[in-house]
Image (tube, grey):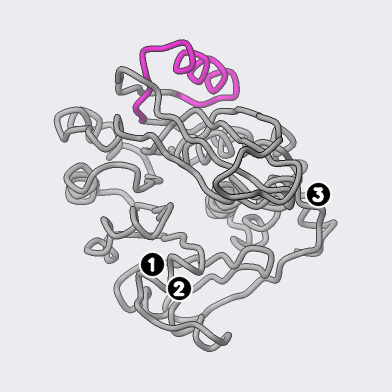
Amino acid sequence: MKKIVVIGGTNHDIFAYTYQQAKMNDSNPGYLKDSFGGVGRNIAENLARLDLSPTFITAIGKDIVGQDIIDSGSKLGIHFDVIEVETTPTYVAVVDQNKDMLVAVAAMDELEQMTVDQIKGKIDFVNQADLLILDTNFNQTVLSYIFNEVKIPICVDAISTHKAQKIVHFYSQMKMLKLNLFEAKTLSGLDCQTKEDIEKIGFYFCNQGVGEIYITLGDQGAYRFDGKSHQFISGRKISIVNTTGAGDAFFAGVIYAFEHQMDALSCGMAAALITLQDSKAVSSNLNQEQLLKTIKEYQL
């Protein structure tokens, strides 16, 4: 089994759900749920649930929430290499009655303020692994250092259009890059009205040096491009409980496929479908058996 390292963000997720259509500038009746999140952490947990036993390098606070994150993740098979900070980063999202996110606040200053000195001692360990999965939660200086010092294949989750701006000079160093359509349009600077436009965008990133580019289209499906060809998988009609975390699950499914020499889009879509039907950002129903069952059930 390949040795996988994830470097990325960890945070405490708090979701505020409205019972009815949200009214701006007003108090809305609703309810709260919380869980552990962060793109890097979500991917690491998904990989652990798929029995890939990742090592996770992340910043976690010296607080009760931080210790709970370490304890729960360790039980699932995540090996933590913690960069200790004062407070665990927190993410708060407001979700409407249709389960779509309206707005979110990411209090991630602890991540943004990390220094090269805090990550420098981890690089030799990373270079002994087979694959690095990286999110863009860190500042430009730290991300640049990682790209310049890491010698193994790097797979990147862009997270958002704002954070993805930090990686535009490193496309040629990426084995894989996952974007949603909005991120792909923004980073490429290309318009997108048709299927052909999406294909142009995909090959744009390949021409910039990305090994494999994955573009997710929400419930419409996802594309994979590798410079020579492209694939598309359509979405499936399901009862969606929560959309947060589906992209993280998709990317973990792609990594699972890479490890097991399976179809990347099938595994990615299956992991996303499982997660979309769960209230949490990482579904406790995700495992190898359920992944394979979902691929068969939805003919992915």
Is 196 displayed left or right of 32 in the figure?
A: left
Please name whichever residue, 175 or 298, is drawn nearer the observer in this view of the structure.
Answer: 298
Circles 1, 2 touching at the beta carbon (< 8 Å): yes
Location of residue 208 by image quarter: bottom left
Answer whether residue 206 is visible to the viewer in this image. Answer: yes
Label 2 residue SS: loop
Q: Which residue is mark 3?
A: 293
Label 1 residue SS: loop
Question: Which residue range is magenta in the image?
Answer: 58-79
Which residue is at 71% across, 51% downward? 21
Whole-Å distance between the Cαs marked 3 and 1? 29 Å
Is 127 placed above or below 153 here?
A: above
Which residue is at 56% across, 52% downward? 247
Q: Which residue is mark 2?
A: 226
Q: Disc 1 residue type? A: Gly
Is 170 displayed left or right of 82 in the figure?
A: left
Label 3 residue SS: helix
Q: Which mark is residue 24?
A: none
Residue 275 at what x, y percent from top left? 69, 45
Please name whichever residue, 143 or 263, is drawn nearer the observer in this view of the structure.
Answer: 143
Which residue is at 76% across, 56% downward? 295
Is 242 placed above or below 285 here?
A: below
- Characterize the local packing of mark 1: few (<14), some (14-19) or many (20 or more) Cα atoms within 10 angstroms: many
Circles 2, 3 touching at the beta carbon (< 8 Å): no
- Characterize the local packing of mark 2: few (<14), some (14-19) or many (20 or more) Cα atoms within 10 angstroms: many
Residue 192 at what x, y percent from top left? 49, 82
Q: Which residue is mark 1?
A: 211
Residue 163 at what x, y percent from top left? 33, 53
Which residue is at 16% across, 35% downward? 116
Q: Disc 2 residue type? A: Asp
